[in-house]
Each structure stands twice: as structure tokens, then as C-alpha cells.
Image (cartoon, rainbow, N blue to C red):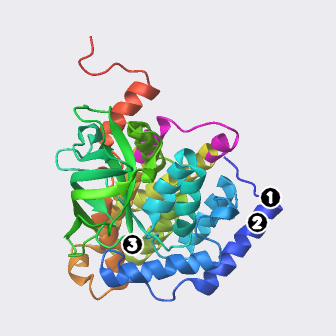
Amino acid sequence: MHLAYTPQQQAFRAEVRAWLAANVPPAPLLTLECEEGYHQHVGWERQLASGNWGMVTWPEAYGGRGLDLIEWLIFEEEYWGAGAPLRVNQNGIFLLGPTIMEYGTPEQKERFLTPMAAGEKIWAQAWSEPGAGSDMAAIKTTAFRDGDHYVINGQKTWSSRASFADWGFGLFRTEEGSQRHKGLSFILFDLDTPGVTRRPIRQLHGHPGFAELFFDDVRVPVENRLAGEGEGWNVAMATAGFERGLMLRSPGRFQAAARRLVELFRQHEHAAAPSAREAVARAWMDAQAYAYNTYAVAAKIMAGGKIGAEASLNKIFWSELDRTMHRTAMQLLGAAAELRHLADGSINEWLEGYMFSLSGPIYAGSNEIQRNITAERLLGLPRVGAG
């Protein structure tokens, strides 16, 4: 595949590169999963918004630039290539934002998208529950109607960013006695609403990147519901498609990691195992292949097509690529890397990335489930046990 950029696209790349060179913090921010680091990253989101870079594909009326997906890919390549910070509001801009674009009313778009792009409101994803992780249809948390409000009771867990975020979005059972995919609604809620209790979940590194949420008679206006009552499953599946598909994990992220991995190999080649060279080369090629595929998907969408079950295949690829790259890096660094990470920023980055990569095959829908979807919907294979 040969990519040829237009003069306008090349000029846009130069503009992005120049702005990032002038604005990316010279020293790495603290992890966004601790409170101080979280607020540093919120500051970065607002710095991005000052240059109108919060979400470049959104209409200008909502804080974007009205750019197409190819320009977004260019932006992401430059963003990751510049070593810019992780996006603390990725649940909002990459998952909820496109969902609001598709299902929200004009009032909801104006109310939620503009502050999202500006970094003024940071969003948490609140889907999973005890007993309803990969199987979201098993959700039990209720939101029953009381006039112009829903009254929410129940619990969510593994809610990303919920320790510090401003707002959350999730699925709730709004029809009493309903089962599985029926009777669910997609509701947005302020995390400071009376009756919401946050209980941070500390990870291996000790920081609370997730939280449990408890709802005790939490009153949320009906106007915070996306789409119709009982239509939440379809809305959530659209959000899941964004999570697995094009935007959550742009190829620029993996291309930048692959370049760092090549440099790491050069530094440790003298002590590396014979198989290391092949593993590094494979990681670089896979990152390039993912980029080319994403450009093809973007072109398909821009031509009026849609991404369907292919999103599951996409998710399997990027999550396993991420894990393989970081595992290779840890092998190059050797066992001492786990002891030296507090004193060496580069090693800390690989170690943090490795630990996070282990969750990749689980979040956004476990890879086992995504393989089933790929087999049934893309390959037309029968369900296991189907008669």
C-alpha cells in the first residue's frame, strides 16, 4: 500500500508538528491514575483546547476543527511521535463523544460536547458490574422513572477514571422485570450527584485508575438519557464499536512504540537473545500493517461505509500487538528492569506499559468474545453447539 498525501495534508502535518513542538511538556507528566497526575493531564487537555486540538474531527461549533479521518490519523501520528501525554478524557472524546454525535439531541450535543472538547468535563466509563463484566446484558443496576427523573440504585465496578472524573456514562435497567438486552437505557450522570459513592480500586502500581461506584437513590434527570427508554443496548453497542474500532487506539500510538522498541533493541543488542531481532522486526511490521489497515477503514467510512463486526478483529489485533511489543521490551531489559523502574524513566515507561498491556485482551470486550464475533459474523461459522 502506498500513501500519498496532498499538499494540504502535508501543510496540516507541519502545523500540528510545530504546535506540538512548542507545547508538549518538556518532562513527562505524572501518571494520570494518581490525583496529582490526573490534574496535570486535565491541564494538558485544556492546553490542547487552547489550540483547538481537543478533538479535530468534531464540528467547529463543538470545539473541533471539522477535519476528516485522514487528517485525524495525521494528527495522531504527530501527537504520539512528539511524545505528548496520554489523553485523560479518552472515554469522553473517543467513546462517548461519537455516541452523542449519533444519538444525542441538539441540546445534548451543545451541552456535553463543547465542554468535553475543552477539557472542562472529564468522563468515566461505568458499564461493568459484579457479575456483568464481559456480559453486559447481565446488568442489574436499576434506574426507575419517577416523574422527570430516574432513581438509580446498584453498583458499577472497574469504572475507568471514576476516582477523579466529573461525569460518567453507563447502562441501567429501566424496565422492571426485563432480562438480558431488553429494558436497558443509556444514561449520563454527574459523579457528584448526592447518593453516588466512589470507592477507588488500587492497581499493581498502587494508583486508583479505576473505582467502584455505588448508587443509593441517585436522582438523574430524564434529559440525561441518550436515545429512547429501553434502547440502551443499541447505543452501548455503538459505543463499543468506537472502543474496539477506529478511534480508541490510533495506529500512531503503536508506530511510536515500535520506533522506541527498535531503539531499545539497538541499545541492548549485544546481550539480546537471538530471537529478539525477529520479535522487534515483527512488532514494527505489525504496527505498520495496523496503520495501513486503519487508513483503509478510514477511507471506507469517508466513502459512506460503516465498520461493523470488523471492529472485533481490529480490537484483537491492536490489543495483542500492544502486549507483544511490551513483552519484547521487558525481555530486552531483563529482570532488573522491574527493580530499577523507579529510578529510570524510560524503564518505568516500558514497565507501566507492560502491566497495562496485559489488560488489553480483556477490556473493550474480551478477545475470546471478539473471536466468536469474528467467526460468526465475518466468517459465517456456526455457533459452537448449534444444531
**Magenta residues, as a range?**
298-315
| Residue 269 seen anywhere in this rendered image of the structure | yes
Check disc 1 and report the residue beneath it: 6
Q: Residue at x 67, y 73 (%)?
A: 16
**How much space separates mark 1 and mark 3, taking CA atoms?**
39 Å
Looking at numbered disc 2 in the image, what kind of residue is underneath it?
Answer: Gln
Near-viewer residue (270 or 217) = 217
Looking at numbered disc 1 in the image, what kind of residue is underneath it?
Answer: Thr
Question: In which quarter of the view is residue 138 placed?
Answer: top left
Name the quadrant of the C terminus: top left
* Above or below for 172 versus 217: above
Residue 121 location in percent, x, y? 46, 70
Does residue 22 show up magenta in the picture? Answer: no
Residue 247 location in percent, x, y? 52, 54
Looking at numbered disc 3 in the image, what kind of residue is underneath it?
Answer: Glu
**How much space separates mark 3 and mark 2, taking CA atoms?**
35 Å
Does residue 314 show up magenta in the picture? Answer: yes
- Asked if the residue under mark 1 is in contact with the one under mark 2, i.e. CB atoms within 8 Å, the reply is yes
Check disc 2 and report the residue beneath it: 10
Residue placed furthest toward the right: 7
Residue 276 location in percent, x, y? 36, 62
Check disc 3 and report the residue beneath it: 269
* Above or below for 292 versus 261: above
